[in-house]
Image: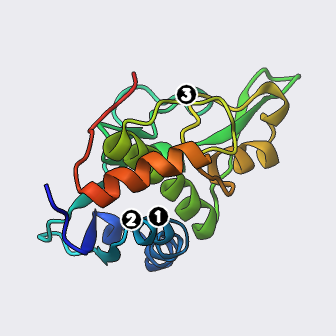
Amino acid sequence: MHASARLVLALHGLDALHERIGDEFVSLCRHELDPLVQAAGRSLGITLRHTAHGDLELHFDVRPEMGPERPCGFAMLGEGGDVVVVEAHRSLGVCTTDPVTGKIHRRGILTYDVLLARALFNTGMHELGHFVAALPHVHDPNNYMVTGNPPVDMRTRRGRRAFFAGSKRFTSEQRGRLVEQLRSGTWLEGSEE
């Protein structure tokens, strides 16, 4: 398959979020995804229109989470290689137990638009890594393909913010695999469970 010079990323549902979140997300795409696309000899186009189809698509699931509330437990942030679950990101927090009452208190960690946008972007890049190049999960908290919860020493509000909304990167090997697939225009649609 010969890929066209332009690669369009369609961001479905991102426009349902606050404009600042969408603006920050698109800015991150320009800063961090565009260099990969350019290395593949292509140019990046981004659309937020609901009816638009792209070569790549990310769907932002903005429905309320289903099931019992687990404010301190693990939440599925992305799924299916192209879905980013917004409410799971919004519910991330740090829990502490009041020693007197035994009640659990949760403090949100993605309480600013820029933090939420970065966390959504990190998850989007993770899902695209699976979808485009079948990249496997890793344990490096500074890598887009990290999975699971933060290490114990990062389970503070600051640590969890860094884990979920911190700046991440791909290794040179991961970048090479992504560029190869972006150049060819074929997606391996891989997902590691």
- Point 39% across, 21% down: residue: 193
- Badge 2 element: loop
| Crowd tier of the residue under label 3, counting other residues whose Cα lies within 10 Å: few below 14, some 14–19, many 20 or above | few
Q: Reply above or below: 135 against 9.
A: above
**Picture coordinates of residue 106, whole percent (x, y):** 69, 39
Q: Report whether 101 appears left or right of 19.
A: right
**Picture coordinates of residue 141, whole percent (x, y):** 69, 39
| Crowd tier of the residue under label 2, counting other residues whose Cα lies within 10 Å: few below 14, some 14–19, many 20 or above | some
Q: Which mark is residue 74?
A: 3
Q: Report whether 23 appears left or right of 172.
A: left
Label 3 sits on what residue type? Phe
The Cα atoms of the two marked residues, 3 and 2, are separated by 36 Å
Q: Which mark is residue 40?
A: 2
Q: Which mark is residue 93?
A: none
Q: Given this view, does label 1 or label 2 mark the residue nearer the observer?
A: 2
**Picture coordinates of residue 76, whole percent (x, y):** 45, 33
Q: Reply above or below: 57 against 151.
A: below
Proximity of marks 1 and 2: CB atoms separated by less than 8 Å: yes
Label 2 sits on what residue type? Ala
Q: Report whether 41 appears left or right of 112.
A: left
The Cα atoms of the two marked residues, 1 and 2, are separated by 6 Å
Q: Given this view, does label 3 or label 2 mark the residue nearer the observer?
A: 2
Q: Is residue 43 visible?
A: yes
- Point 46% across, 40% down: residue: 77
Q: Which residue is mark 1?
A: 36
- Badge 3 element: loop
